[in-house]
Image (cartoon, grey):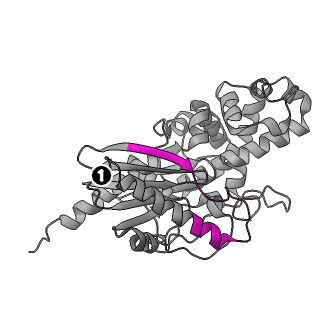
Amino acid sequence: MRCIVVDVGGTTLRTACWDADVQALSGVRRVPVRGTGGLDTEDVVGVQRSVVEQLVEEIELVRGSAEGLGAVAVGVAFAGPVTGAGTVTGAPTVWGGGGPALPLAELLRERTGMPVTVVNDTTAAAWRYADPGGPAFCLFTVSSGISNKIYVGDDVLVDAGGHGGELGHLLCDPAPDAPRCDCGGRGQLGALASGRGMLAAARRAARAEPGAFAVSRLAELCAGTATPPQPDDITNRQLARAAHEGDPFAVAVVRTGLAHLATAVSSVFLAAGIRRYVFVGGFALAVGERFLDVLAEELLRVGCFGLTAPEIRDMLVLGAPDDDHCLIGMGRLLGKRHQASEAPLLTK
């Protein structure tokens, strides 16, 4: 079975063709998504319309390519809560807070004439790592925002209304001036521990401690943009690289975000006993193993009742070092549903 798979993130829209017979992607294409990048807009409906138009254009491009010939279905992984019917109920990182629910699956079926499945992007990504009959796990995406999903019993836990797996909106800092999330709320996990959140934290720290910033590896990486480098010159790429290399200033910034993420992970462990946590997303993967090392230290601080320090560290892993999680997972999910639809009915 061949299908078209799409990943709509807060920054980038990715498309590809998935061949279920050989379990492989081909023709991967990346373009900037026509969203607002999480900024407020008075014309949310207009942005939604623009995103739908872009999706139709990109799907038709794949469909008309050599890789897309013979595609029988479309699967879209979308950055926001999605109902069982494929309606996107919110997309803060794509079109900001607010706006009406968007019946995306229905709209794309009408426009393309193909069967279309739409699920949350982290739901799709979880299927890349799913092992039928294997242990339960919780997948976290740490990129433009933060989301999570739990896989257990050969399924991803999301209710029909699309609820579940939105720990990025967990309130972590109740201060009235706490950093603002793309959804409009303040002090939420995504505003503090996502790539965007940590970038904002790094710039605040550089302003508050100019001396420490000036002698940091992070400042050295920014030196090409200004002399001396300014806080606003810091980028996510530079922050992740500096933290990866062990720069004390950058690691301290990342730790402030991971302290809040540790609380979320600890809550999942204490509530459900999940012993495996997979981390994907551009920021987490760019920081690499140091991301997990610092997170494990913070988990030990907040507590995972009954676990030792080595056991805590052992349950944290990074996903594959690419950005194809949603595309591959979406393809595998479509393949699983296709097989289920063709399975013969068993009767006694």
> Residue 254: which quarter of the image?
top right
Q: Which of 82/173 is in front?
A: 82
**Residue count near mark 1 (Cα–Cα under 10 Å), binned few <14, some 14–19, many ≥20:** few
Query: Residue at point 46% right, 45% down?
Result: 29
Verify whether residue 33 appears in magenta.
yes
Secondary element type, mark 1: loop
Query: Residue at point 70% right, 28% down?
Result: 242
Q: Is residue 151 above or below residue 100?
A: above
Residue 81 place in picture, x, y as percent? 54, 66
Residue 154 place in picture, x, y as percent? 33, 57
Q: Which residues are magenta?
A: 27-50
Verify whether residue 96 appears in magenta.
no
Query: Residue at point 54% right, 48% down?
Result: 31
**Split into 4 quadrants, where in the image is the N terminus?**
bottom left
**Split into 4 quadrants, where in the image is the C terminus?**
bottom left
Residue 262 place in picture, x, y as percent? 64, 47
Residue 151 in view (yes/no): no
Outermost residue, front direction? Answer: 64
Q: Is residue 125 above or below residue 80?
A: above
Question: Which residue has dot 1 on it?
Answer: 133
Query: Residue at point 79% right, 29% down?
Result: 225
